[in-house]
Image: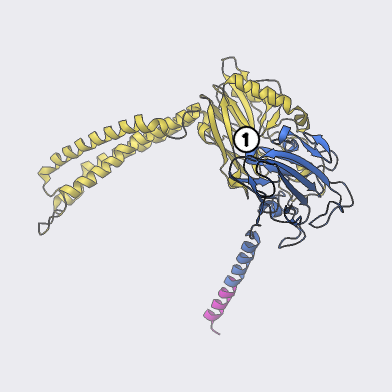
Chain colours: A blue, B yellow
Amino acid sequence: MSKGGRLAISLGLFLVAVGLVVWAVAAYLTPGTPGGEVNFTNTQSAGQPVNLTVESVGSIGFGPHPSWVSYMTKDPHTGQWIQDNTWVLPANTQVNMTVYQFDSGSPLRNQQWGQVEGTTNNSATVNGASFTHFDSRTGAGVGHTFAIPSIGLVVPLPGVASSNICGAGPCLPSKWAHNTVTFSFKTPGPGSYNWQCFVPCGLGYLFGNGGGMSQENYMGGFLDVVR
Amino acid sequence: MANNSQDTPRDLRKMTGIWVVLSVAADLLFWFLVGPHVPPGRMTETAKNNQLDFNILLVIALPVIIGVWVYMGYAITHWSAKRNGPEPVGGASARSNKKAQVWWIAVTSFVVLFLAGFGTVALIVDHGSGGGEGPNPVWMPAGAARAETAAINGTGTGILTEPGGEHVLPVQVIGQQWKFTYRYPTFGGFESSQLMLPANTTIAFNVTSLDVIHSFWAYQLSVKADANPGVNNVAFTETKNVGNFTVRCSELCGLWHGAMFNYGSVVSPSDFVTWATTTEAANHANTKDLPPFAWTYTPDANNAAGGWFPDGTVTPYSTVETYGAKQPAS
């Protein structure tokens, strides 16, 4: 084979290798299909409070990223735990939220997120006890937060200190150690509002804000508020 | 150039007349009708000065563009080739006109150099024009240095009044994925998701980040400063009018970058003090759990310094660090 031919083949193979690397990196970084919506507008009479139950798990346990941390939603119609973390809610309506927190915790990067804000009376309950702020340097720290930044809502979810930690979602409250956090808030007018966690809980990622923290439907989603 | 050199002075006079009338009309219309509405408005002295700078640039630019259009329009209507007529361009009159060239170079050079000088002076006089000046600001408003020292040393309370009568308020802006929070060191160091500012007060924004690079852009205040981890980026402005403004992150910072915004308010000084003291009291319990006020924070318990999470050595907040060799001059 001529020198030019060998050079052409070498160059071609090099380009193919570069292309494969680019494709692999792009595939890794490109978010998958976001999860679906859960409709809460038909779960109660008009004007009545909506009951929204979710859980935060250390590992989702299934799907393309089974090791990623995630929220899960309790389907109000079937009672099943599903990873559909965009919620359709009626506008200007009270939402009674229950969060089963199954994950361990650590000190907060910013203790400001230890303060409960934006809920009814700016308070929440953890395992039945009312609280307005949580010092994340105490106990098992804070596992996650539930926050809707655009309406100023932040609730810290204390971490679980137990050997009976749920390894993969969905986690059953009857089986695994958890903290039950409850609070209420009023939905704003119609619109789309993102919710997120403020704890850098993306295990194994730089700054902890990769993985489940950087893909919709794991540690963040939307409230689609409708009339 | 005209094919008849004797027509040139007359053409020039006509073009100049048209240009002067149109330019004066356009400048007056712009200055009085559009100018007051040019962003970023007049909520702060910085915004007002930046608006003035934009308006002056436009008032200079309009005659330039009108001059080009007038010449182009005149050439099309007066010097275009007639069908079956003689070729209008050629001969000596089509060659370079040194006088015109000298004038063109002189005028455009003067305009460019004037604007460069004007922009530089405006940057200095406006104390950085609202941009982040880094940890050691070169252009500081009167009293700001003393206020910054009071903030870091915890020796000043409330809105600080300097000997010259200037009112100064240090405010810390903390960027994190994906929200800005604000600390008020002269009100007990409480932290809030709300940004409230008193009117007629010099504000010293101390901007930092707990994770990646963000950028604090208070559009109507005409303040924009990058929020870098481990760096105290200082920007100044002087509030004037009460009103609401928008804060956006202007540095692509991850999944919820587009949602990283909030609204702030400039209120009367008395309303501000009421809000600040009320919030200070309401947040008192949580403020005790915050790290002591510092220009930057490195909460290494969860690797805000850039490590991988978690690092396996979960500890309380590290000793807070101040950035840079220079503390604000007292």
Q: What stretch is highlighted in magenta?
A: A1-14
Furthest-right residue in view?
A: A163
Choose top left, top right, bottom left or bottom right for residue B218: top right
Q: In which quarter of the image is the C terminus of chain A?
A: top right
Choose top left, top right, bottom left or bottom right for residue B99: top left
Residue B282 appearing in the image = yes
Q: Quadrant of the N terminus of chain A?
A: bottom right
Q: A175 or B329: nearer the eye?
A: A175
Q: B104 or A104: nearer the eye?
A: A104
- Per the image, label 1 sits on a secondary structure element best described as strand
Percent of width and height locating residue B184: 67, 28
Instruction: Name the side, left or right, on which B209 lies relative to A144.
Output: left
Percent of width and height locating residue B104: 27, 41
Confirm whether the magenta stretch covers residue B61. Answer: no
- Residue annotated with mark 1: B207
Q: Is the magenta stretch mostly helix, strand or loop?
A: helix
Residue B158 to residue B66: above or below: above
In which chain is the residue bearing label 1? B
Identify which amino acid the numbered label 1 is placed on. Answer: Val
Furthest-front residue in view?
A: A45
Number of other residues with Cα within 10 Å of mark 1, as a class: few under 14, some 14 to 19, many 20 or more:
many
Choose top left, top right, bottom left or bottom right for residue B328: top right
